[in-house]
Amino acid sequence: MDWVDLRSDTVTRPTPAMRASMLDAPVGDDVYGEDPTVNALQQRVAADLGFEAALFVPSGTQSNLLALMSHCERGDEYLVGMDAHTYKFEGGGAAVLGSIQPQPIVQDADGSLPLDRVAPAIKPVDPHFARTRLLALENTWHGRVLPADYLRAAHDFARERGLALHLDGARLYNAAVASGVAAREITRHFDSVSVCLSKGLGAPVGSVLAGSAELVDKARRWRKVAGGGWRQAGMLAAAGLHALDHHVARLADDHARAAALAARLAQVSGLRVLGQHTNMVFVEVPAERLRELDVHLQRSRIRISIGYLPTLRLVTHLDVDDAGVERTAQAFAGFFGSVV
Ligand SMILES: *Cc1c(COP(=O)(O)O)cnc(C)c1O
């Protein structure tokens, strides 16, 4: 019996068809700009998202870091959500490696940074202060899709204040599919966007940073400095192209399965379903029972992540099917002693 791994959508493994596309990929040395498959992926993403250029990089963390370092210089500042990945989950890279000061802003429950809270955080031009350069948003955030009118307002705000606007769109395509819009309807508000191919899209490795040609040139230089200049990366880019061709529309299946799982768990007494957003279900379980629950679920070959967030986050993806959702619902019900 295969494991049902609900810890994250990063755990997906390349499908046989994806592996076949990787084997066949034409390759060259990407540091020389000569890998045709990498170039095709970069052009594809730039065109899809409405930007001049794009850069294929090993991880979302590096993609965001390169974006921050390309928008900001030493002594500059970016405004970012207190709970945002680029602030909290990337090892402080912008400060550590970029000499860029983060200014965290407390987010609303939907993941947005209220603009009336952002405005007073912008520093006056004065030697006392870091220079505020950039506003960074995240979509989806904990599975939540940022509202379209908020994106428009954030865009206008950034323009008025002379700030650049970056999107950590690790799960951009989840947001687009859930909203029933093309991804570029979301990205058109931004100056740069980072997208992960290695989450729900199912590629083994890789993210893409899209922006203006000038920004992407800077990012390419910082990628080399960061040790991310790679050679025959076309085999990995091929997986990304395959993911964009075959794994975008099916994200709707992950969202439907997350909704089905949430509905089943809502009938189990002893736990509380806090919400379901795109491919994530958030569940509150009595803290003292978490470890025991984990052991119980592992007996049914179900993996969850405990002790990382205050609540359980169950994530559906390419490698979780209807039977996996059913087995998970049964195992939770079995543990809490109720029937669903
Ligand atoms: C996963 C993730 C990243 C970083 O991606 P890695 O490839 O794991 O470095 C950035 N932002 C968000 C919101 C993510 O979920």
Image: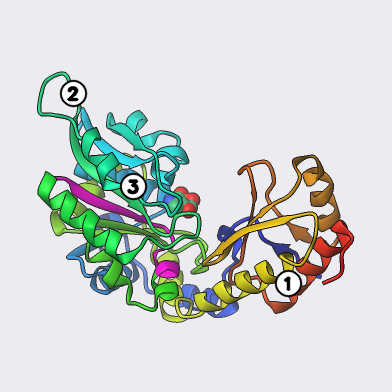
Label disc, if present, on residue 129 of the rendered structure: 2
Residue designated by label 1: 324
Say what secondary structure mark 2 lies in: loop
Say what secondary structure mark 3 lies in: loop
Front in this rendered view, residue 235 or 72: 72
Query: How many numbered callouts?
Result: 3
Q: From mark 2 to mark 3, how far is it between C-alphas?
A: 21 Å
Front in this rendered view, residue 334 or 213: 334
Quadrant occupied by the N terminus: bottom right
Is residue 48 visible in the rendered image? The answer is yes
Task: Give the x, y percent position of residue 21.
Answer: 47, 78
Question: On the rendered structure, is 119 left or right of 327?
Answer: left
Front in this rendered view, residue 150 or 185: 150
Label disc, if present, on residue 147 of the rendered structure: none
Front in this rendered view, residue 41 or 306: 306
Residue type of the residue flagged with mark 2: Phe
Q: From mark 3 to mark 1, how far is it between C-alphas?
A: 36 Å
Quadrant hosting residue 263: bottom right
Q: Nearer the viewer, mark 2 or mark 1?
A: 2
Q: Please determine whether, in this image, residue 45 is positioned above or below residue 291.
A: below
Residue designated by label 3: 113
- The reply to whether dot 3 and dot 1 touch (C-beta < 8 Å) is no
Q: Is residue 171 magenta?
A: yes
Quadrant hosting residue 255: bottom right
Task: Give the x, y percent position of residue 218.
Answer: 19, 47
Residue pictured at 27% horizontal, 72% vertical: 185
Other residues around mark 2 within 10 Å, as few (<14) / some (14–19) / many (≥20): few
Quadrant occupied by the C terminus: bottom right
What's the magenta region?
A: 163-175
Other residues around mark 1 within 10 Å, as few (<14) / some (14–19) / many (≥20): many
Question: On the rendered structure, is 121 left or right of 305?
Answer: left
Residue pictured at 59% horizontal, 65% vertical: 12
